Image (cartoon, rainbow, N blue to C red):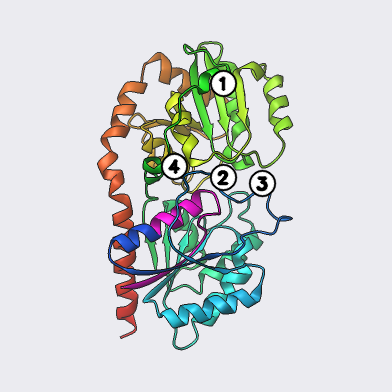
Amino acid sequence: MRLAVVGPTYPFRGGIAHYTTLLVRYLRAAGHTTFFYSFTRQYPALLFPGRSDRDPSNVPLRVDCEYLLDPINPLTWWRLVRRVRADRPDLLLLQWWVPYWTPSLTVISSLLKRPPATKIAMICHNVLPHDGGGVIDRRLAWAVLRRADALIVHSELDRYRARALMPYAKIVKAFLPTYEPILHEAAAAASTLRTQWQVPDHRRLLLFFGFVRPYKGLEYLIQAMAHVREQIDAHLLVVGEIWGSLTYYQRYAAEFGVADAITFVNRYVPNEELLPIFTAADVVVLPYISATQSAVVQLAFGFGKPVITTNVGGLPEVVHDGVNGLIVPPQDATALARAIVRYFQEDLGPILTANVQAATAERAESWPQLVAIITELARDLQGATK
C-alpha cells in the first residue's frame, strides 16, 4: 500500500517528532511504500515559547524524509500538494495538535480534496489544545478536521471531543503507542546523577518529566512535597524546559518550605540522558490538570517505572490504579501527597514495577497494532470510493 505522512522529525525535538519518526519506521517495516514529508521550519522564533525546537541528542531518532513544508510560507503548501499528487498515496496522514496549524492544513487538505481527491486521515494528538478549548479553538479545529475522511484519536476524551465537533465523522481510536524504541538507541551514561544533584542515596527520588506548562500541575506537586516530607525523606527532580518562569516555581517551592527538596533541570533532555534519569527515579509523578494522553507515561513504562498521576483525560486508560501506578483527583495536593506516601510506606514499588515490566510484550505490539489500524482504514476508505 502507498501511504504518505506529514509531520515533524529530526532535527526537530519532542514527543510528536518522535511519534512521527517511529510511525514512518513501522509503516515501512510493515512493507508499505511510505512517503514522508517534513518541515523546513515549524514555528517562527517569536511564536515558540521554548529556547529552541531543535533536538540536541547525540543519538537522535531519524528516518529518511523530504523537508518540504513551512507552515507560514504558502508557496511550500503548494509544493507539498504537488508532491503528494505526484506520489499518489492511497492515504495521506496529516497530524493535528494545536490551532497554529489551521491555515496550512486547511489549505493543503482543501486542495487535495479536489478531483482527483486524495484520501486523508488526521491523527489527532489533541483535538483541542491543553490550555484552550474555547469557542475559537473549537472553530479552528472544526475548520481543519472536517476536511479529513477519517480521524485517528488516542483517548476516549478526544473521541468524545471529535464526535461533538463532527457528529458524522469516521473516528478510529488507537492507544498511544510505546516510546520504548527510543531507549534501545540511547547511549547508556554513567548513573552519577544523584551525586551531581546532591541527592543522598537513601533519599526517595520523585521524577516530574517533560515540558513544564500550566496544565501539567507542577504547583500541586510542589504543595504535596510539603506533606510528603513530613513522613518520607523524599526529593523531587523536575526535568524539562520550563515554558514560563523558573523563578516562579523556585519561589513557590520556597513558600511551601521545600526549596531544598527540589532540583530543577530546566532544559530539554537529549535521548542519551533518559536512561540514567529514569533509572535514578523511584517513581514518576505527573499531576496533570488536563490531558488527553501522555508520551511521558509511555516513556516511564518503557523504563519500567510506575506512574502516579491524575484522573484526567485518557490517563486512567493506561495508568491503572494499584496495577501499574496510582491515580488521584486533579488539583488535590493532599490526595497526591497521600498517594506518594502510600507508595513508599506500603512498599508498592516492587509489585507495580513488576506489573509494568510484565506488559513489555504487550507494549511492543502497540506500533504494529497502530499500523494495522491505519492499513485497514486506508482499505476501507479506498473501498468506499469504488
Look at 55% across and 50% down and name the residue there. Answer: 13
Residue pointed to by mark 3: 50
The structure residue drawn at horizontal position 57% and vertical position 23%, both measured from the top left corner, is 224
- Sequence order check, earlier mark of 2 and 3: 3
Secondary structure of the residue carrying tag 4 is: helix
The crowding category of the residue bearing disc 3, from other C-alpha atoms within 10 Å (few below 14, some 14 to 19, many at least 20), is some
Residue 180 vs 239, above or below: the answer is below
Badge 4 amino acid: Leu
Mark number for residue 315?
4
Q: Which residues are magenta?
A: 1-23
Q: Amino acid at mark 1?
A: Gln
- Quadrant housing residue 373: bottom left
The front one of 355 and 83 is 83
* Mark earlier in primary sequence (1, 2): 2
Q: Residues within 10 Å of mark 1 (few under 14, many from 20)?
A: few
Q: Which residue is mark 2?
A: 56
Q: Are marks 1 and 2 in contact (CB under 8 Å)?
A: no
Determine the CA span between mark 2 and mark 4.
Answer: 29 Å
Q: Amino acid at mark 2?
A: Pro
Disc on res. 51: none
Q: Do the numbered discs 4 and 3 sit on residues whose CB atoms are within 8 Å?
A: no
